Amino acid sequence: MELVSGSEIEKRIHKFQEELQRKGLGGALILKNVNLFYFSGTIQSSALFIPKEKDPILMVFKAIERVKKESPLKNIIPVKGRG
C-alpha cells in the first residue's frame, strides 16, 4: 500500500536531481525522517542516496518488507549495521 504516489515521489526526486546538477554535486544522502518520507514515502529505519542522475537507492536497516509496501522506489536494499 503506497502512501505517496509513485509519480509524486518521482517528480520530487527529479526536481532535487536538477538542483544537485545545478550546484555541481554528485548526489545526496538523506537521513532525516521527514526528508526520507518526502523522497521515498517511508520513515522506516533507512538511508536514501539520491545521485545527480539515475535512480536513487534506499538502504533499509529494518522492516524491509514494510518499506517495499510503502515506497514506490525501485532500488530498495537491506543493510546491516544500524537499527
Image (spheres, helix red, strand yellow):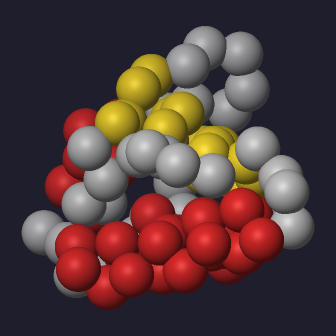
> Residue 27: x and y, percent?
73, 48
Query: Residue 34: x, y in percent?
Result: 67, 78
Question: x%, y% of residue 53?
Answer: 53, 49
* 11 in relation to 23, above or below: below
- The reply to whether residue 77 is visible in this rendering is yes
Residue 3 visible in rendering: no
Above or below residue 9? Residue 17 is above
Rendered residue at 77%/71% (across/down): 22
Residue at image position (73%, 26%) is: 82
Residue 60 in percent (x, y) is at: 51, 35
Q: Quadrant of residue 63?
A: top left
In this orientation, which residue lies closer to the viewer: 74 or 63? Answer: 74
In front of the other: 6 or 61: 6
Please give the name of the residue rendered at 83% of the width and 52% of the height, measured from the top-left corner.
Answer: 25
Please, is residue 61 above or below residue 10 in the view?
Answer: above
Q: Quadrant of the N terminus?
A: bottom left
Quadrant, the C terminus: top right
Q: How many marks?
A: 0
Above or below residue 32? Residue 53 is above
From the viewer's perspective, is 59 left or right of 11?
Answer: right
Q: Residue furthest left?
A: 1
| Observer-nearest of 82 and 40 | 40
Give left or right: position of 49 versus 22.
left
Q: Residue at x 61, y 14 (%)?
A: 80
| Viewer-proximal residue among 13 and 78 | 13
